[in-house]
Image (spheres, helix red, strand yellow):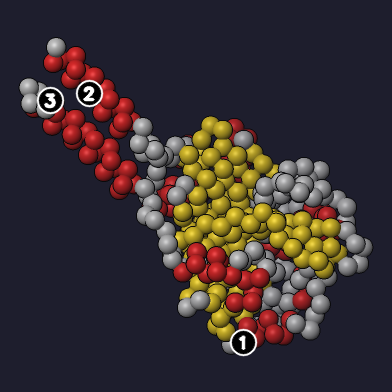
Amino acid sequence: MRTLAPFPLLAISLALLLVIAVGSRTAAAPATLEGEAREFVAAHDLDGINQFKFLSPDIVEAFPPGRSNAANDERLKKYPPASTDWKIEDAHFIYEGDHYAVQWIFQSKWKDNGSIQREATLAFGVVKGGKLVSWTEFFDDSVGELQHDGKMGTYTEKEEAYPWPAKPGMSRPYRTYDSNSVTWKNYPDLSVKLTP
Amino acid sequence: MKLPRFLSLLLLLLSLAATIPGHADALSRDEVVSLVTHMLKSWETGDVDSFSNAFNADAVFAYPGGRLSKPELTDMFKKYQLEKKDIKIYTGIFVVEGNRFSGQYQFAATDRTSGKRQAVGTAVTGVIKGGKLTIYKEYYDQHILNWQEEGKIPLDEGQVFPAPASITLGPERIN
């Protein structure tokens, strides 16, 4: 059997090189991420809408129009939404323990003029005991309004979710007041407070 | 003839070490969060190099309003610093899986001309390549900063939510 015995120092150095290479990869790479969130999403085949069937009674929710909970959700049931035919496309999930994040394109049809809105969303869920205990969505709600008014193009069918469509037909400066691209004045009622 | 044989073995081992997948790109969770947080915090200091160095040369930065290349992003950062002051970043939760991440933060700034302040809940998601950001997307609702600057809704600065923390979801914008 041939060995590296004639070159012990080099042999040891090579061995160390390999150990360092493999060891540094092991230390730097993220741990395998298994947990309740991944199992929860897989078990219920979640798509971004049907997770609302699995809310904990203690759910805490937050959306661009405001925060909510089970009592407030119940209050809102008497108000029909302004659009119909809701569906989710191109949902992509990442997981970390009890947390997950998902990005998708939401589509619905405005009831008043029949136009289609397609908005990209980034949402976060937290799962405990097989129920969703926290749900938070971020999106630019002006996208759907601008599409309703025929001022913005929509995402194409195969388009990846980005904050705005690839061809919106307009632009907006970064984090700067812009009354031209936010025209709807449906201000929130600040007197309504969340109750347990 | 032992030395050539040894050199061959040396090359083989070095090649094996070099081809271990993911070695160069893999960041730990803490490193991913640190990369993103450090980049965000550079908005507060105005350090354009610190901000720019977090992105790859071919990075795409997307926000509700457009998509920017790295040179465009760097120019925008410099211009924004001239237009705003007292920028504050409040970070929230992060979810990290491999080279992908999503996180929450609040961006607050005061317009130097109008003196109006905004504090807008934001979500970010992106992909890291070679230790730097290569795809970076920010989600926030333009209504929030518009209505804050109009004095219609509160700031609730320092609380990381999509809308100011004291606003309750009503029927006005369920669509």
Q: Quadrant of the N terminus of chain A?
A: top left
List x then y, in percent, for residue A65.
Answer: 70, 69
Q: Picture quarter containing residue A184?
A: bottom right
In this view, the mark in front (3 or 2)? 3
Q: Is residue B161 visible?
A: no
| B140 lies above or below A4 | below
Element carrying mark 3: loop
- In the rendered image, which residue does mark 2 sit on? B10
Q: Residue at x 84, y 63 (%)?
A: A109
Marks 1 and 2 belong to one chain: no
| B75 lies above or below A7 | below
List x then y, in percent, for residue A88.
Answer: 71, 60
Q: Residue at x 51, y 38 (%)?
A: B55
| B118 lies above or below A57 | above
Using the numbered discs, state the Cα–Cα distance from disc 3 to disc 1 in whole angstroms. 78 Å
- In the rendered image, which residue does mark 3 sit on? A2
Q: Nearer the viewer, residue B132 or A101?
A: A101
**Chain to which the residue tagged by mark 1 belongs:** A
**Mark 1 crowd level (few <14, some 14–19, many ≥20, 10 Å Cα):** few
Q: Picture quarter containing residue B154?
A: bottom right
List x then y, in percent, for residue A86.
Answer: 77, 66
Residue A28 in the figure: left or right of residue B87: left
Residue B117 in the figure: left or right of residue B2: right
**Mark 3 crowd level (few <14, some 14–19, many ≥20, 10 Å Cα):** few
In this view, the mark in front (1 or 2)? 2
Q: Amino acid at mark 2?
A: Leu
- In the rendered image, which residue does mark 1 sit on? A195
Element carrying mark 1: loop
**Chain to which the residue tagged by mark 2 belongs:** B
Q: Amino acid at mark 3?
A: Arg
Q: Quadrant of the C terminus of chain A?
A: bottom right
Q: Amino acid at mark 1?
A: Thr
